[in-house]
Image (cartoon, rainbow, N blue to C red):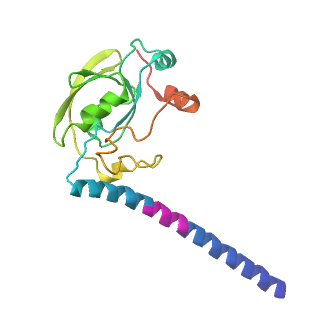
Amino acid sequence: MKKILIFSAKILLLIIFIKVLILVFIVSLTRKNETQISASLVQNRAGFSHVWLGIQVLPIDKTVVKNFNLPFHRGLLVRKVISGSPAAEAGVMRGDVIRRIGNTRMRDTLQLRKIISKMSPGQKVRVVYIRNMKTKTVYVRLEQPLFDTLIDRNAQLVYGVYPAVIPPTDIPYPYFYFGEEREEMENELPENE
């Protein structure tokens, strides 16, 4: 009987310990999300506002051309379009190649960041892209991102705390073309017809 009581007490302590660990984990996640949201609120109260397209891209270089068998050597390959974002609403899709934003030819992500960071909510921007070897043009009305889309569950802070120091970007974290990242994308991109 005594052994059963000791065993039951140990099980009870183990259950309490596991519950405490889960609670600590949940609190740490909540604080991280609150920090990200409050950073955006601080920016808005200070008079800063930023806009986004809601895309993640890869700059097209020799490696990308070779790995994805692309017939062109410049532009930005759309890796991800955030659902509900301005780009998604305009019809931009994963696998599209953005050639121009406004009148500027896209060569790298820095150009994209600079152009978008100078724009205001509600402003329309022309996006020229290639899909299935056909050039298409859409006009995207830029918006401030919603709080749920500010937080990318796989990344750290999507937008910088102070835009004067860290320019806003549509790319939450760098996408380089190494190993698994390239293979994952290669498997998910539509075939060119």
Look at 34% across and 51% down and name the residue there. 161
Q: Nearer the viewer, residue 150 or 18?
A: 150
Q: Nearer the viewer, residue 93 or 143?
A: 143
**Image position, residue 65 (x, y; %):** 46, 16
Of the 4 image quadrants, the one containing the C terminus is top left
Residue at far top of view: 71
Answer with left or right where residue 173 lies relative to residue 96.
Answer: right
Answer with left or right where residue 130 lies relative to residue 29.
Answer: left
Q: Main secondary structure of the magenta part?
A: helix
**Image position, residue 63 (x, y; %):** 50, 18
Q: Quadrant of residue 192?
A: top left
Of the 4 image quadrants, the one containing the N terminus is bottom right
Residue at far bottom of view: 1
**Quick check: can you spot residue 119?**
yes
In the rendered image of this protein, does residue 148 appear above or below residue 76? below
Q: Nearer the viewer, residue 65 or 193?
A: 65
**Image position, residue 76 (x, y; %):** 37, 24
In the rendered image of this protein, does residue 71 appear above or below residue 85? above
- Indicate whether residue 165 is drawn in magenta: no
**Quick check: can you spot residue 1?**
no
In the rendered image of this protein, does residue 112 appear above or below residue 166? above
Q: Which residues are magenta?
A: 24-31
In the rendered image of this protein, does residue 102 appear above or below residue 72? below
Look at 22% across and 36% down and name the residue there. 118
Q: Nearer the viewer, residue 131 or 74?
A: 74
Q: Quadrant of residue 12?
A: bottom right
How many numbered marks are there?
0
Residue at far front of view: 165
Q: Quadrant of residue 2?
A: bottom right
**Image position, residue 111 (x, y; %):** 31, 28
Look at 28% across and 37% down and name the residue there. 53
